[in-house]
Image (cartoon, grey):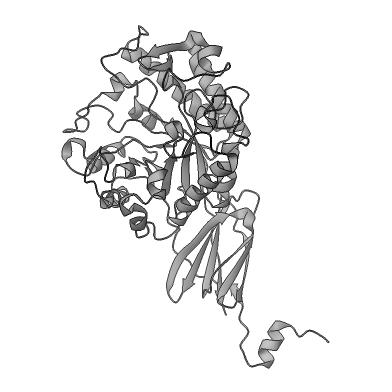
């Protein structure tokens, strides 16, 4: 028995054949916004939920966390890989982190960073590897491995209360930290390198960091490290973003009316305004963990000031974990969504923000994840880096077909394409449906009158969309 082609069969039965053909329509530009969340493992804040879980249990927890982040239409995680001179990845330089197995130096039986990258990228989520450059031990009571920096390089370490710190003023400290970070940049397919605000320890109980150095000298050490890090990363893999998350207030009284309990410029050696202005970062994420009101630590006032200090993006950290917390009693989830709305209205440069931290999203703290469904209404592409590259990838080859109530979209990207964005039109309304890895090659969406496929490279550059309409 001979098979009758489906199109001919449809014509014989009187049903009109439908196909997608190129059209000159122009869909709206893709939404651009960095939507991130920190995933901290020190003290098992976010992941894994406790030390000593099996490899399969740790992986299941991380998959569930990434599933929640993907379901919210977020596009980045800041994944802690070096909490305290240790490694949440396979390293020949530093020991395995104790927050995985309970014992520093003991392998968890798999490579968490490699696993995170694979799982996150499959969901269209960027992975920014988060390093604590100079903290050696968060608590001196911990047992350390023989190759931990406190034993392998004791000459660079100093005790500070209950902690141990690597002295940033010692050249070997800075060289070692840079070596560790660049080892990860070379060996792993990360999308970003991220540093937090622990350059010098926060003041504690009147203690002094006994290095005999002035605040200006300390700032010069940190400035040199930040500058060297940025240039080193860009030489190795220019598409890898470099971001830093400093204390949210540069100096008390800046801008006018702002109060702070410490002077991060003087006490932490954090001249973060300089790093932004000099272009030593691809983004700055000041920890703006305060409320919109009162003025003395006003979120919008600080955000507006920060976004006026340079031409690179400022994507503030927002304190999702403080919803209904003892640190901030009565803070509602609406405070967070209002702050996100302000990040879309205040100042210049590309939109973005980062949630502290991922656990609050997974647990739907105070109903925040439910509310975010109305804030993240469509997927957004990570903003581009035109100061690094403006070369757009070629438009992909695209095909589409109807199957029942679904449209199957296929594409053939060029070698520079990392992701594709699929938009769909029904009637007169366009909507971004998915932003997914280019290697998938195809995807299904609800039946659409027209589709548009845009290629995105590792820098965030977008091709002209390829548009097909149903005939």
Asked if residue 329 shows in the view, the reply is: yes
The quadrant in which the C terminus is found is: bottom right
At 37% from the left and 8% from the top, the residue drawn is 211
The quadrant in which the N terminus is found is: bottom right
Residue 136 image point, x, y percent: 46, 19
At 42% from the left and 49% from the top, the residue drawn is 362
Q: Is residue 415 left or right of residue 195?
A: right
Q: Is residue 400 left or right of residue 304?
A: right
Residue 394 image point, x, y percent: 60, 55
Please tell me which residue lies in front, 40 or 436: 40
At 47% from the left and 28% from the top, the residue drawn is 83
Asked if residue 384 shows in the view, the reply is: no
Please say if 234 is above or below 213: below
Picture quadrant of residue 219: top left
Residue 253 image point, x, y percent: 19, 29
At 42% from the left and 56% from the top, the residue drawn is 31
Q: How many marks?
A: 0
Please tell me which residue lies in front, 434 or 325: 325
Q: Is residue 448 left or right of residue 187?
A: left
Residue 8 image point, x, y percent: 71, 87
Please say if 332 is above or below 135: below
Please tell me which residue lies in front, 367 or 208: 367
């Amino acid at each position: 028995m001979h098979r009758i082609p489906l199109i001919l069969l449809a014509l014989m039965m009187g049903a009109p054949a439908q196909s997608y053909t190129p059209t000159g329509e122009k869909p709206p530009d893709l939404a651009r916004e960095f939507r991130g969340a920190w995933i901290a493992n020190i003290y098992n804040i976010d992941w894994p939920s406790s030390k000593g879980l099996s490899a399969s249990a740790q992986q299941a927890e991380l998959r569930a966390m990434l599933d929640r982040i993907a379901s919210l239409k977020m596009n980045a995680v800041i994944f802690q890989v070096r909490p305290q001179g240790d490694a949440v990845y396979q390293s020949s330089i530093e020991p395995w982190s104790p927050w995985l197995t309970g014992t520093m130096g003991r392998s968890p039986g798999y490579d968490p960073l490699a696993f995170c990258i694979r799982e996150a990228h499959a969901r269209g989520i960027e992975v920014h590897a988060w390093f604590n450059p100079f903290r050696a031990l968060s608590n001196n009571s911990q047992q350390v491995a023989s190759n931990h920096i406190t034993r392998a390089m004791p000459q660079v370490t100093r005790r500070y209360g209950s902690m141990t710190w690597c002295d940033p003023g010692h050249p070997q400290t800075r060289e070692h930290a840079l070596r560790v970070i660049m080892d990860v940049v070379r060996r792993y397919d990360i999308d970003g390198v991220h540093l937090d605000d622990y350059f010098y320890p926060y003041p504690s109980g009147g203690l002094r960091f006994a290095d005999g150095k002035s605040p200006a000298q300390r700032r010069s050490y940190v400035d040199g490290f930040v500058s060297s890090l940025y240039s080193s990363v860009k030489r190795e893999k220019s598409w890898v973003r470099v971001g830093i998350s400093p204390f949210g207030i540069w100096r008390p009284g800046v801008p006018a009316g702002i109060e702070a309990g410490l002077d991060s410029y003087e006490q932490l050696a954090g001249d973060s305004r300089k790093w932004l202005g000099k272009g030593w970062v691809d983004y700055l994420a000041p920890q703006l963990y305060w409320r919109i009101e009162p003025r003395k630590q006003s979120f919008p006032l600080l955000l507006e000031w920060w976004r006026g200090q340079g031409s690179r993006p400022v994507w503030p950290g927002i304190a999702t974990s403080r919803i209904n917390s003892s640190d901030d009693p009565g803070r509602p989830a609406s405070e967070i969504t209002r702050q996100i709305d302000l990040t879309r209205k205040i100042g210049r440069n590309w939109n973005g923000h980062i949630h502290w931290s991922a656990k609050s999203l997974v647990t739907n703290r105070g109903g925040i994840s439910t509310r975010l469904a109305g804030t993240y209404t469509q997927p957004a592409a990570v903003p581009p880096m035109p100061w690094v590259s403006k070369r757009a990838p070629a438009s992909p080859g695209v095909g589409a077909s109807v199957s029942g109530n679904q449209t199957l979209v296929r594409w053939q990207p060029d070698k520079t394409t990392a992701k594709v964005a699929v938009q769909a039109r029904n009637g007169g309304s366009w909507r971004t449906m998915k932003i997914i890895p280019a290697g998938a090659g195809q995807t299904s969406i609800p039946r659409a009158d027209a589709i548009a496929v845009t290629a995105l490279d590792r820098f965030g550059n977008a091709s002209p969309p390829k548009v097909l309409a149903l005939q």
